[in-house]
Amino acid sequence: MNDQDTILSLSDVRYSWPGRASFGLHVPQLTLTPGETVLLLGESGSGKSTLLSLIYGTIVAQSGAVTVAGTDIAAVSPSQRDRHRAEKIGLIFQQFNLLPFASVRDNITLPLQFAPDRRRRVPAPGAEARRLCNALGLPPQVLDTRAGALSVGQQQRVAAARALIGTPPIIIADEPTSSLDAATQTAFLDVLFQQSQAHNTTVLMVSHDARLSPQFDRVLHMADVAQSVRGAP
Amino acid sequence: MIWRLALGSLAARALTVGMTILAIALSVALFLGVEKIRTGAKASFADTISGTDLIIGARSGSVQLLLYSVFRIGNATNNMSWQSYQDIAARQEVDWIVPISLGDSHRQFRVMGTTPAFFDRYKFRSGQSLRFQDGGTLDDLFDAVIGADVAKTLGYQIDDPIVVAHGLASFTKHDDQPFRVAGILKKTGTPVDRTVIVSLRAIEAIHVDWQRGAKIQGQSTPADVIRDMPLEPQAVTAALVGVKSRLQVFGLQRTINEYPQEPLLAILPGVALQELWQIVGIAETALIGVSAMVVITALMGMMATIFSSLNERRREMAILRAMGARPRVILGLLVLEAAVMAAVGAILGLALLYLGLLIGQPIVDRAFGLWLPIEAPTLREGWTLLAVVAAGVIVSMIPALRAYRMSVADGMIVRI
Ligand SMILES: Nc1ncnc2c1ncn2[C@@H]1O[C@H](COP(=O)(O)OP(=O)(O)O)[C@@H](O)[C@H]1O
Ligand SMILES: [Mg+2]
């Protein structure tokens, strides 16, 4: 498999949280190709969020290589890593994704602030925010609403719009639907995939809910991907 | 957008932020107010006498002489003899000389004996002359001219009778010689406002039946007999002197200070004022120090507020980090917020100062005879406000650096 076909790869990655007897993780090999949608299933506490943190680089592996869109993120400076994250990865969390005091528009356009390349792909951020809201089924008047005033379901869609704006090559979602009911979950994933497919975006989503599996190209299990280690490495 | 986020975050914590800003505003208002009163008092002191080259009195301290002769603070320990006064008056360097005789009082106000020349020679606020708001100068032996505050406090009008008491706060009244209000002066903002002015001869007249501060028993000389007496004073308290040429001031001062017949002291009002500032300077510095401490306390309060907000704002910062904000941005955001709080507090403090001045100006004027001008902020005040903002920024660096370290150390992972 050459670099062209790989958007994300982890090889022989080890990480353990600081502190005695804390949680550690070992990922021998994980590779994602451009445009595929992958569901990573695992029990809560199995280290899914830790794995994602390693990918978007707020924590750095103690050994091994994490390559995101062609860049080994351990090899670059922390501020380059921050910039790289903003440029290449759209992020959605389980809940409380947004700055509650800021407007929906500011929340959606926030990553562009730290990603000049991504910003360049969006000539009119306000109009793009409106378009994404529309595509994700949010009424246009929410743009000027305080994000904290929206329902949880609406907030998750705003978070999706924020992840999609400026078409980053990877979207990483950490249990984005666990706070939604079943019907909303399916609708949310539908619009997310619709929008990401138009730009050949890779979607990596983690969840503990196997019922979502049919909607993805590939399903991985945490137990197969990584070994968790208790105690000091 | 960073600005909008900072302001939005502040607005979301309106109550604590509001209290912090209010504390800063009050402390800044206090600091500026103390400055205003300090400079106002200094200016009004400096404005009290102008156009006088030398003040002469019996030998004592120069500050003491200045205080009792011009500001009516304290008392003369000794008088200068009338003989010396005349000697000095006769010197060729002397352009004009005005005697001042203190020691009597009317109600809570001091009585000053002088000559009508006082009204021409006494100058205040860089050369302004005394002006009458009603009536005129001293013509008759028992005429009195009163300052604006005397008239206002006691409700006196022209031709009202006045009884002069001997010595300050003494209850033995010179009630056999009633004076008449001949003139009321316009307000000057100087101790003249609180003075009853009579002629030097009148001071002698009220003491005709007195000896060593006590009334001679059973003796009472009728007013028309007194009018015919020579009433030459034995001594005066002090004298204001103008010289013909300013070059002669120091020569005359030396001559008087070495006057062989009597120990005298001649002072330059400006120099004595400088000495006074040096004495007052210590208290002034202490006052500034205390009010500066209040400002620092308010800024420390802001720092504590930022510290305690760090935990509840962990998620906010984590989201920013996840979106690609560098730790530096987190630091900048916190510092920016602190700068905004300090700046709003400083400006609000300035507004409070003006509000306080508007309300307090007449009260301070009435109570202390101190006129605090309401004018555009001075450069000094501008620098003060800027310093407050700068101090706010510096103080906020401590919690901001902590947030910085937090966001570097654990990556500020968004956790549920
Ligand atoms: N910031 C952190 N500091 C220390 N330990 C952490 C931190 N985040 C997670 N962990 C540890 O990692 C383990 C796995 O957590 P996580 O990756 O969140 O799992 P999941 O997302 O699958 O529920 C937890 O048991 C926890 O002890
Ligand atoms: Mg998790």
Image (spheres, coloured by chain):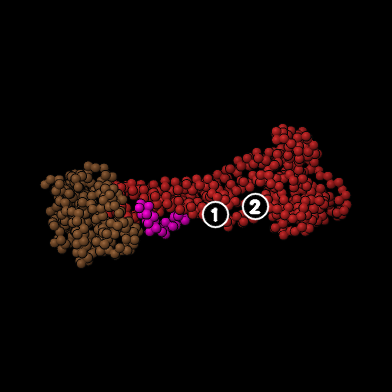
Q: Chain of mark 1?
A: B
Q: Chain of mark 2?
A: B
Please tell me in which quadrant of the rendered image residue B9 appears. Answer: bottom left
State the hue of chain A: brown
Q: Is residue B99 visible?
A: yes
- Taking the spot 51% from the left edge, 52% from the top edge, the residue there is B350
Residue ID for mark 1:
B354
Instruction: Classify mark 2: residues with Cα within 10 Å, few (<14), some (14-19) or many (20+).
Output: many
Where is residue B316? Give x, y as percent: 32, 55
- Taking the spot 30% from the left edge, 63% from the top edge, the residue there is A140
Judge left or right: residue A64 versus residue B81.
left
Where is residue B407? Give x, y as percent: 30, 49
The chain whose colour is red is B
Q: Which residues are magenta?
A: B1-23
Q: Is residue A44 visible?
A: no
Above or below, A190 against B247 in this view is below
Please tell me in which quadrant of the rendered image residue A109 appears. Answer: bottom left
Judging from the image, what secondary structure is the residue with disc 2 in?
A: loop
- Callout 2: CB less than 8 Å from ligand 1: no
What label sits on residue B369 in the rendered view? 2
Q: Is residue B14 magenta?
A: yes
Question: Residue flagged by tag 2: what amino acid is it?
Answer: Gly
Judge left or right: residue A96 versus residue A71.
right
Judge left or right: residue B298 versus residue B173.
left
Q: CA distance from mark 2 to mark 1?
A: 19 Å
Camera-side residue of B300 and B342:
B342
Where is residue B7? Give x, y as percent: 39, 55
Camera-side residue of B38 and A158:
A158
